Image (cartoon, rainbow, N blue to C red):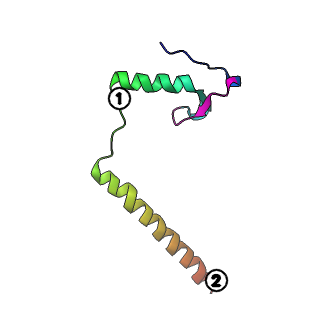
């Protein structure tokens, strides 16, 4: 059993990825979710190696290339 304040006036409200459109959730609810995850054996795991390469290298490089060539074509049209 966890005991804590859930009243908004207590100032113990936080935004999390899990709260979504609900806005803020109380600190005790965050602790309850963490405890539930630990008791159920659900943990945050590392990404598989190929996904790390895609996320960390390919996506930023593609973004930079698109930005560079997109700006370059706009500049060339104005000349």
Bounds of the magenta segment: 10-18
| Crowd rating for badge 2 (residues with CA inside 10 Å; few <14, some 14–19, many 20+) | few
Viewer-side residue, 70 vs 60: 60
User: For residue 73, which numbered disc appears in the image?
Assistant: none
Mark closer to the chain start, 2 or 1: 1
Identity of the residue drawn at 53% across and 23% down: 29
Examine the structure image and report whether residue 11 is included in the region drawn in magenta. Answer: yes
Instruction: Please tell me whether mark 2 or mark 1 is closer to you in this view.
Output: 1
Where is residue 13? Give x, y as percent: 62, 29
Location of residue 8 with respect to 64 vertically, above or below = above
The answer to whether mark 2 and mark 1 are in CB contact below 8 A is no
Where is residue 72? Give x, y as percent: 54, 78
Q: In which image quadrant can residue 75 be found?
A: bottom right
At mark 2, the secondary structure is helix
Q: Residue furthest right?
A: 9
Where is residue 20? Give x, y as percent: 56, 34
Identity of the residue drawn at 52% across and 37% down: 17
Location of residue 63 with respect to 5 vertically, above or below = below
Q: Residue furthest top?
A: 1
Viewer-side residue, 78 vs 31: 31
Viewer-side residue, 73 vs 29: 29
Identity of the residue drawn at 66% across and 20% down: 7
| Crowd rating for badge 1 (residues with CA inside 10 Å; few <14, some 14–19, many 20+) | few
Where is residue 12? Give x, y as percent: 63, 27
Q: In which image quadrant can residue 8 be found?
A: top right
At mark 1, the secondary structure is loop
The residue carrying mark 1 is: 42
Q: How many marks?
A: 2
Q: Work out which quarter of the rendered image holds the C terminus and state it.
A: bottom right
Location of residue 73 with respect to 16 vertically, above or below = below
Examine the structure image and report whether residue 45 is included in the region drawn in magenta. Answer: no
The residue carrying mark 2 is: 78
């Amino acid at each position: 059993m966890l005991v804590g304040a859930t009243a908004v006036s207590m100032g113990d409200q936080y935004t999390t990825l899990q709260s979504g459109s609900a806005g803020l959730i109380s600190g005790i609810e965050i602790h309850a979710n963490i405890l539930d995850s630990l008791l159920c054996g659900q943990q945050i795991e590392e990404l598989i190696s190929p996904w790390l390469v895609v996320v960390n290298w390919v996506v930023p490089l593609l973004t930079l290339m698109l930005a560079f060539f997109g700006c370059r074509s706009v500049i060339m049209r104005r000349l």
